[in-house]
Image: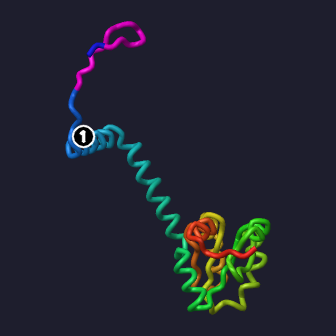
Amino acid sequence: MDRANPWGNPVVVAEQPLASTASTTEFIMAQFIEFVGNHPVLSGMWLVTMAAIVFYHQRTGSKGVGPQQAVMLINRNDAIVVDVREKKEFEAGHIVDAISIPLAKLEQRITELKKHQQKPVIVVCKLGQHSGEAAKKIQEAGHEQVFKLSGGISEWKAQSMPLVV
């Protein structure tokens, strides 16, 4: 098939049948191996970066629980819920009996949780991104069973769990 490129010269394009999935996968792997061979420094930097991200999340993260597991912890183990969203977001809707301690004020108000030291703590934020940091601070304050709500209040809502206003 002849096509004209922007410079006016005809371009010949060979039409080939679509390759099978196995040969496509082999081709992609061959390209990947060639790329790694041609760019060892770039590939090494990518591996180091990925390892650092995984290491950081393992050290700073706490155990995550989904909404169903959180309900079981609340009902069976009398867990308390600490909501680290801003006051305005908390008032728009929160988990029943949740304690509102905005993340910015957590270090100053962490003593409010001393009376609940033997109970499990579930930390909630908007999307599950800041609860790991808050959970780490609460663990450092002496709480042993600290969990973060995976997906945050957004996941709670997505699973049609109840909120109070």
Q: Position of residue 106 (x, y in %)?
A: 74, 74
Q: Residue at left 70%, top 80%?
A: 98
**122 relative position to 104: left or right:** left
The main secondary structure of the magenta stretch is loop
Image quadrant assignment for residue 151: bottom right
What's drawn in magenta, residue-wise?
Answer: 3-15
Secondary structure of residue under mark 1: helix
Looking at the image, residue 33 lies above or below residue 72: above
Q: Position of residue 164 (x, y in %)?
A: 72, 76
Q: How many marks?
A: 1
Residue 53 among those drawn in magenta: no
Q: Residue at left 21%, top 42%?
A: 20
Q: What colour scheme does the image use?
A: rainbow
Q: Quadrant of the N terminus?
A: top left
Task: Check disc 1: other Cα within 10 Å, few if <14, some if 14-19, many if 20+.
Answer: few
Three-letter amino acid code of the residue under disc 1: Phe
Name the one closer to the observer, 95 or 84.
Answer: 95
Q: Quadrant of the C terminus?
A: bottom right
Q: Residue at left 68%, top 90%?
A: 116
Q: Position of residue 38 (x, y in %)?
A: 32, 37
Q: Which residue is label 1 attached to?
A: 27
**103 relative position to 17: left or right:** right
Name the one closer to the observer, 124 or 18.
Answer: 18
Name the one closer to the observer, 30 or 86.
Answer: 86
Q: Residue at left 60%, top 86%?
A: 74
Looking at the image, residue 112 lies above or below residue 152: below
